[in-house]
Image: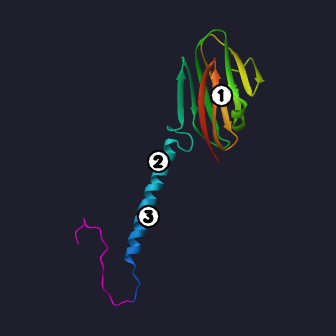
Amino acid sequence: MPASKQTIENVRHNLQLDENLHQHKKGWIIQKTGWAVLYAGLILAALGLFGTGVMSYRTQARNGNSIKYERFLRYESEAEMTFDIAEVEDTITLQIPQYYMEYIHLQSITPLPLGNQTIDGQTTYFFKGRGTASIHCGLMAKKAGSVTSTIVVNKTPFTITHQIYP
């Protein structure tokens, strides 16, 4: 039989076997499909669909300010969010909604803020700075689900979304 033809050879025999070759063909198709789905999932996981990776990292820039963060997080895993601020006059403000903090625990902020205040469900952190500045936040996901929030840095709003896997 030629190698290019992919069929099952029907053999006539005297044995009393219930050969359901059509069922075997279906099983092989399902098996090949399963392997393809498994490999696709493995590649997407390696790229960061389910956590740290190329697909997870996001950067937004607006008015000379930018934010870098991970879009996909795992429950109780650590992540970073970095704000790069241009043209700082004297004070930097970082405003984070309380709703966001129900899903994300802010473990650390570098540099340390001069102070903070919470008004109307918004926590505002104050920093000293001149020229350009960077603020690094250490995060930990504390609740599974999806959270979309607007974080304001020096009156520049950034809408971010995290998908937190259990």
Judged by depth in the image, the label closer to the viewer, 3 or 1, is 3
Residue occupying the point 49% across, 51% down: 41
Image quarter of residue 89:
top right
Q: Residue furthest front?
A: 120
Q: Provide the residue designation for mark 3.
A: 31
Residue 43: numbered disc = 2
Magenta-colored stretch includes residue 3: yes
Query: What element does badge 2 sit on?
Result: helix
Above or below residue 158? Residue 51 is below
Residue 148: x %, y % from top left: 62, 35
Vertical arrangement, residue 80 with respect to residue 113, above or below: below
Amino acid type for the residue under numbered disc 3:
Gln
First in sequence, mark 2 or 1: give its number: 2
Marks 2/1: CA–CA distance: 29 Å
Element under label 3?
helix
- Residue occupying image coordinates x 43% and y 60%: 33
Residue, disc 1: 137
Residue 165 percent coordinates (x, y): 62, 45
- In the image, is 42 to the left or to the right of 116? left
- Are discs 2 and 3 less than 8 Å apart at CB? no
Question: What's the residue type where badge 1 is placed?
Answer: Cys
Horizontal side of residue 120 vs 149, given as left or right:
right
Quarter the N terminus occupies: bottom left
Q: Main secondary structure of the magenta part?
A: loop
**Residue span colored magenta:** 1-15
Residue 99 visible at all: yes
Question: Quick check: is 99 in the magenta stretch?
Answer: no
Which amino acid, mark 2?
Ile
Chain-order first, disc 3 or disc 1: 3
Dot 1, how many residues are within 10 Å of its Cα: few (below 14), some (14-19), or many (20+)? Answer: some
Q: Position of residue 124 (x, y in %)?
A: 72, 22
Q: CA distance from mark 3 to mark 1?
A: 45 Å
